[in-house]
Amino acid sequence: MFGLTTGLAVFLIVCLFLACFFEFINGFHDTANAVATVIYTNSLKPTMAVVYSGLLNFSGVLFGGITVAMAIVNLLPMDALLDGNAYHGIALVLALLISAIIWNFGTWYFGIPASSSHTLIGSILGIGLAYYFLPGNIGVSVVNWDKAKETGLALLISPLIGFSLAIIVMFIFKRLIKNEIIYKEPIPGKRPPIWIRMLLWLTCGMVSFFHGQNDGQKGVGLIMLILISILPAQFSLDSKVNLQSIHTNLDAIEKIVSTSDSTQFGKDELEQFANIKFHTKHYHETINGKEFSGDVELAQRFELRKDVVKITKGTEKLLKSPNFSISIKDKSHLKTELKSAKKLIEFAPSWVIIMISISLGLGTMIGWKRIVKTVGEKIGKQHMSYAQGASAEIVASVGIGLASTYGLPVSTTHMLSSGIAGSMVAKKGLKNLQKKTIQNIALAWVLTVPVSIILSGGLFLLFRAIF
């Protein structure tokens, strides 16, 4: 297997299994939120609901692209973390996966709708922060703080948006739909009218698909972290992308950047500018006479990845600088070239996407009952009505879909549970919420990231000491 020793091959298989297990848990932990409404309102039988949701989760991962996956990979600058020792890469991914699984499984066991996204992001940040405590690495920046802030902001405000928009959607429902049955609690064992069932089928399907598109991509990102950490040479570059075409992109980037007046640059801008020139030259020299990554020696492939990373990240930083002055036309051209250049390093093999799709789809079909009961009965003092379930799922699906489009990891759990809470408030105000449940959800929301950071950081330092 790619020339691996038996020990490394075993660790690689273990890590891939744990990543699939994390996504499997994600399926029955998070996707329970999607099926909660159709099951609780008797719109679909439980078995049919979870199979339906599982298939749409599968489709969401399969056809959802890899924008969110790359956001996960880019939280940790792999060029800083990889030092040629594959076992250090193993320490990284094992700590990340084990900590994420522990918190995810624990919150599911107690029926608390906690966020797999928060767990994963916290675990990744824990690795980066723990790296500061390794001998010889004090002061080295190993967390992409710009990406971390962007991701953290998305995770923070998405529940607030879900809560607010659900109130608005409920208000629209009351204005447009005068049939009182939609605002009543489901009668156990009795199916609602067909038009209500169809509405809930649609919203359940939307949440499931967009959950796969967003959360499933996080699993794809995890697998790519594993492959790049343990097999950096083999998975650093997309073997299907022509190296010469990327050189054309990088050459165009350097030329556009050079048109800016460098005399206005500060220390950071000059450093980025120098890096762009150096790595463009190095990339050109390395690929001279070569077309695809298979033509490049294994030891040089990760160096090519570093070239593209340094050039694209450095250019993106310059674009944000007030001292970087180019025309609007050149800025647009520069962004196009950056997007094209990233194709070499931002990719995921088809087998990775299919493996995560299957794991998430199967997980959806198991273990949903605990979360369904919390969502249906324990958020509000009254049981969830048809309109409340539909409004929460509309808000969640739209929010998750938009986040996926912009490559932002958000929490399906928090989007939906906050939507349910908003729909409850829309009916009878804040007094309609069950204080204890809201406190538990809020506590999990607040604790997930710091607990995950401590767990993953501690495990990473332990494993590095062992390896």
Image (spheres, rainbow, N blue to C red):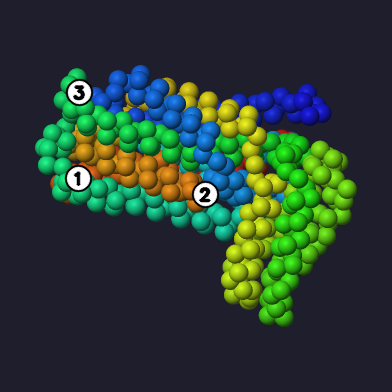
Q: Residue at x 25, y 48 (%)?
A: 169
Of the pair 455 and 200, the residue shown nearer to us: 200
Label 3 to label 2: alpha-carbon separation? 38 Å
Q: Residue at x 12, y 38 (%)?
A: 179
Q: Residues within 10 Å of mark 3 (few under 14, many from 20)?
A: some
Element type at mark 1: helix
Q: Earlier in the sequence, mark 3 or mark 1?
A: 1
Left or right relative to 442: residue 297: right
Left or right relative to 31: residue 252: right
Of the pair 382 and 31, the residue shown nearer to us: 31
Q: Earlier in the sequence, mark 3 or mark 2?
A: 3
Label 3 to label 1: alpha-carbon separation? 20 Å
Image quadrant occupied by the C terminus: top right
Label 2 to label 1: alpha-carbon separation? 31 Å
* Residue 456 spot, x, y in % from top left: 58, 41
Element type at mark 2: loop
Task: Return the residue at label 2.
Answer: 407
* Residue 461 spot, x, y in % from top left: 65, 42
Q: Residue at x 84, y 42 (%)?
A: 296
Q: Amino acid at mark 1?
A: Phe
Q: Is residue 136 visible?
A: no
Q: Earlier in the sequence, mark 2 or mark 1?
A: 1
Residue 173 has which mark? 1
Q: Is residue 315 visible?
A: yes
Q: Amino acid at mark 2?
A: Gly
Image quadrant occupied by the N terminus: top right
Residue 191 has which mark? 3
